[in-house]
Image (cartoon, rainbow, N blue to C red):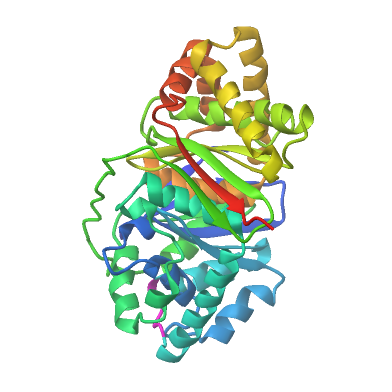
Amino acid sequence: MSFIIKDLNNGIKLIYKQVLSTRLSHFGVTFNTGSRDENEGEVGLAHLLEHMLFKGTEKRNWRQILNSIEMVGGEMNAYTTKEKTCLYASLISDHTRLAIDLLADISLHSIFPEAELEKEKKVIADEIDMYADSPEEMIVDEFYELVFKNHALGTNILGHKSTILNYSRADVVRFVKKLQNKGHMVISYTGPLNLYKIQNWCINAFNTNTLNQIDLSRVAPTSYIPFRIEKTTQHHQCHVIYGNKTVHMYDKERKTGLLLANILGGPALNSILNISLREKNGLTYGVDASYNYYSDAGVFYIQWTADIQNLKKSLTLVKRELLKFASKPFLEKQLKLYKTQFKGQLIMSEEGNQGLMLMMGRSYLDFGEIEPLEKVLAEIDEINASQIHELAAKIFDPESMSLLIYKPEKD
C-alpha cells in the first residue's frame, strides 16, 4: 500500500502507511520548527522546549508521561534539528492508541512546570558539558558556525550554558507558539493497524482548533567566506573537516549531491575515501562525506581523524581525490555500480519502519508529498557522470573550500 495523506481539518495532516508484516506501531509528531527559528536571544530554546514537552500536561505529570510507553515495553524519544522538532514512540500495536493520546497531549497541552524547568536546565547544562568531550561533534558545530557566520543555521542546537540557565517559563511558553503552528505540524504512522482506526484515534486525540498562525519566514544565508583554521585542543588526535557551502533541498542537484557524498564517504567500506585513507594507507580509523541540505542552503564536507604525523598526508590524499571528481567525469560503467550500491542502501533503509515513519513527517513538511521509493530510485538512475562532475567541480573548487582542524597539544 502506498502513502495515504489525510487532513484532520484543523491544520494537522496525518501521513499513513500500513505495514502488515510487523507487530509494531511507530507514531510520530513532526513540527516544521527548529533551532534556526530562534530569534536573537533564543539560542538553545528549541531544544529546551523539546525537553520540557515531557515534563507535564494538564492531565499527566512527568512520571505518568515517562511510564506510559515504557510500562508496555515501548520506547519514546524526541529530537531537535536545525529546521525540525520531532516526538515519537514505538510499541506493540495493541497499545497504539496509548501512544497517539500521549503524544497529542504533550504536543498540545504541556504546561511547563517551573520546578521541572529548573531541573531540566541543569540536565541540558550537563549535556553541553558531555558534548564538549566529543571533538567529532564539536568540530561539526564550529564548522557550521563558520560557514553560516552570523546566521541561525550556524548556531549550536544545544545553546550555551550561560543562556540556558537563564531562560524562564515565559521564554518557553513564547517559543511553543512557533511549534504549535497551523500547517507546520504533521503526524505520521507506520504499522499493521488499518487507516480507519488510526484516523479516528488521531481526530479524537488531536481535537484542537487553537493552533497558531505565525509566519515563520526564514532568511536565507548569503555571505560565505572560505576559511583555513587550525586550533589546538586537549584531544589525542587531529580532527579535520574540509568542505563548502552548496545547494539547498529544492535544487535539482540535491539527489546528485546525495549520490556524490555516498560515493566519496558513505557507509560502505568501499567508499573512495575509505579505500584511499584507511585501506590503502592506514591513515585513519574512519572518514565520512556528508551533504546536509536545508530549505535555503546546503553544506558538503569531508570529516576524518588522524594522528598528528599523518595529518598532512591525509589532507593531501583527500584533496587529490576531490580534485579527480572535479577535473574529469566518472566512467559511466563505474558510476552504474555506485548507483546500484546507493539504491540498495535506500531500499534497505525503508525496511526500518521507525525510520520510514520519521521520514514521512519530514518529507511532507519539506515537499508537500512523500516520494515513492520507486520514483527516488528512478531519479538516481537518471543521474549521469557529467552531472556528478559538474556538481563536484562547483563544490570542490580549492579556492572556495574551507578547512577546520583540531590539533592536539604537543607533549
Q: Residue furthest bottom?
A: 115
Q: Is residue 164 magenta?
A: no
Q: Nearer the viewer, residue 158 or 70?
A: 158
Which image quarter is the N terminus in? top right
Identify the residue shown where x is 59% and y is 22%.
320
Q: Residue furthest front?
A: 411
Compared to residue 114, the image places residue 389 above or below, namely above
Q: Is residue 130 left or right of residue 176?
A: right
Q: Residue at x 44, y 19 (%)?
A: 393
Residue 396 place in picture, x, y as percent: 47, 26
Q: Position of residue 32 (x, y in %)?
A: 37, 54
Question: Is residue 109 inside the magenta stretch?
Answer: yes
- For the record, the magenta segment spans 108-112
Q: Residue 175, can we see it?
A: yes
Residue 9 visible in the shown view = no
- Report the front residue among 353 and 288: 288
254 displayed left or right of 236: left
**Residue closer to the observer: 222 or 354:** 222
28 up-or-down from 313: above or below: below
Residue 117, by quadrant, is bottom left
| Quarter of the figure with residue 245 | top left
Residue drawn at x 53%, y 10% as measured from the top left:
329
